[in-house]
Amino acid sequence: MRPESLFPLYAAISTLKGVGPRVAPLVEKLAGPIVRDVLFSLPQALIRRTPTTAALAQDGQVATFVVTIDAHLPPQRSGQPWRIRGWDDTGFVTLVWFKGHGPHLERQHPVGARRAVSGKVERFGSEIQVAHPDYMLEAERVDEIPPVEPVYPATAGLPSRTFRKFAQEALSRALPLPEWQDPAWLEREGLPPWREAFELAHGPEGEADLSPLSLARRRLAYDELLAHQLALAQRKAGKRAQPGPRIVSGALAEAAEKALPFRLTGAQVRALSEVRGDLAHGERMSRLLQGDVGSGKTVVAMLAMADAAGAGFQSALMAPTEILARQHYETLAPSLEAQGLAVVLLTGRDKGSARAAKLQKLADGSAAVAVGTHALFQDDVAFKALSLTIIDEQHRFGVNERRRLQDKGEGVHLLAMSATPIPRTLELTVFGDLDVSRIDEKPPGRTPVATRAAPLPRVPEIVDRLRSAIDGGAQAFWICPLVSESEKVDLRAAEDRAADLKKILGSRVGLVHGQMPAAEKDAVMQAFVDGEVGVLVATTVVEVGVNVPNASIMVIEHADRFGLAQLHQLRGRVGRGMRESSCVLLYDPPLSEVAQQRLDILRRSDDGFEIAEKDLELRGGGDPLGLKQSGFPAYRLADPVAHRDLIAVAADDARLILARDPDLTSPRGQAVRTLQALFDWKPASGINDAG
């Protein structure tokens, strides 16, 4: 049950004064459907209104004048503005309105009336002009014009100043609540109580008050981070309380490891040991295996599957695309089948008797391992003894999709895999409900990828070199620019580039993009894998994670518009074979200083985690790493970059609270329940659930 003290904040936005049927959809678009959402919408900037005179006014300044209306100047012809000339003893100030406000203005502000006027100054020679003043009041009400005015989000039909009124009313409905933070922590950090923090955040007096580092905003950010970490910690504890099959490593996995043509790296050994510790514990495993493209995650997964098979259980590995599922199958099957384990590949392409035969093997247990796509969790797929699910790029699947696969067994262990490098400082926000293993070494023998940056005008030279390389048997990816958020625009750019390259390279050019039917896309990708296509042109929306050892060239247009982590992942698609490999980052000159630094980092380092941390430092807020696509939480008050020092503190505090009071029945526990209800983040909600 939600505490009664929060009822005013959970009321519909239509209960706010002035939010009628026309305005409500606009407020909801900017903030959300309830009063709390308006409270959580903090000002983004400030307007300073400087009292001045016509003689002293500066161009571009937001200024406040007190003038006497001298004359109304109606438009001489259609399309011209209505003008009012005011006088303040030092000169004239001309007030300008477009779109026929004239007769109304003449009645409201007759000649001889004294008015306080505020707006942005435009100086044309000696003439001072203010277009559509923000305020125009009787002169004695000049004190009602705020010298410092917070700027809120706005949209067509709902200006910032109107939203500000709604925010102030939302603030008035926020009742004092019991303190859920540790008093010693608040005192040490100098943080205000939560109600006072909102008052300060909604009433900034200077730019410093808008900073995420201000004490008020740090307090509110910490509240949100603690609510999130509590939910994740409760979910993690809930998962651990679920029994899972005990799986102990045995001779079968040992034989599979000995048969490998290489030795595991230290990082692989460490990750495998952590996975095996979970599997042998008797509680359901929920672990994320993080590692760069090509770091050897699949081998660790394969040995865990061998452990499960040795204990008499089945495993399933699910990948987001058919081509990736096929790639995993071709990696896993030879090693596992050499140990006498049957492996089946199940995708949407399987039909009729062939599919029925595979389903029978899974149902009767004669197949120990299933590799596939979404086809694995369809209703007619049944396992005899599923105990381990491995989800590749788990953020590409919905929560329900992942759960449907796990529900095909009892207490099924989860091993999620991700090649998206998340900085350590942000790891807890994305994966706080999982145990995390990192593979931070690359297997020996990977060919270093020479990375170079080149301006776009050098494209003809790049294409000439590309033609020579293709003639010599090489293959290349050409990733097209991230032109805009519109996939249609990206697609047009890709089609144009593919057409240009075909004029030079002929039929050896293939094109893949997100709007192609899956079968058609897979056919082009397969032709690339088979060497029939020499250059694969792709939009950024398409998964290019296919393993093509012969591909040794990666060209990325407008590389300066990509996140570093994304560039690093794309680069990881080459350098997998014996050929010398290269990555060309094409940019539109001139480069900004930050863009130059970012491309320099990429040239210097091939460590995805180091690159992600550096990207974070350089870029600051926003979505620097494409984290929204990686299950990143949609915070309202916390900035995960500016407040990253608070994330680990919140995680520690959440663990301590639950260790001392797991049912949250103490006075602080009850207050914490209010905090969770305020943010509506509960262990059972769909936030960021990896398993």
Image (cartoon, rainbow, N blue to C red):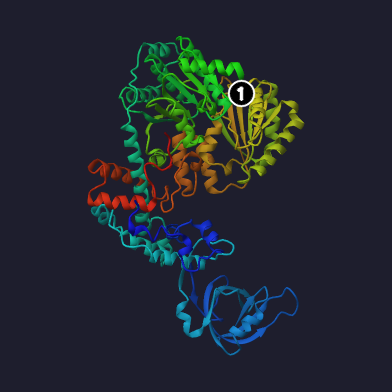
Q: Is residue 58 visible?
A: no
Residue visible at 47% across and 85% down in the picture: 140
| Image spot of residue 663 (x, y percent) | 26, 43
266 or 37, which is in the foreground? 37
Residue visible at 26% across and 49% down in the picture: 669
| Image spot of residue 171 (x, y percent) | 40, 64
What residue is shown with label 1? 349
Residue type beneath disc 1: Arg
Q: Identify the image quadrant of residue 69.
A: bottom right
Secondary element under disc 1, as helix, strand or loop, is loop
| Image spot of residue 324 (x, y percent) | 55, 26
Placement of 93 over or under 446, stated as above or below: below
Total residue callouts: 1
| Image spot of residue 575 (x, y percent) | 55, 25
Q: Identify the image quadrant of residue 301.
A: top left
Placement of 207 over or under 638, stated as above or below: below
55 or 173, which is in the foreground? 173
646 or 470, which is in the foreground? 646
Q: Is residue 337 visible?
A: yes
Residue visible at 39% across and 47% down in the picture: 681
Q: Residues within 10 Å of mark 1 (few under 14, many from 20)?
A: few
Q: Quadrant of the C terminus?
A: top left
Residue ranking furthest to the bottom: 112
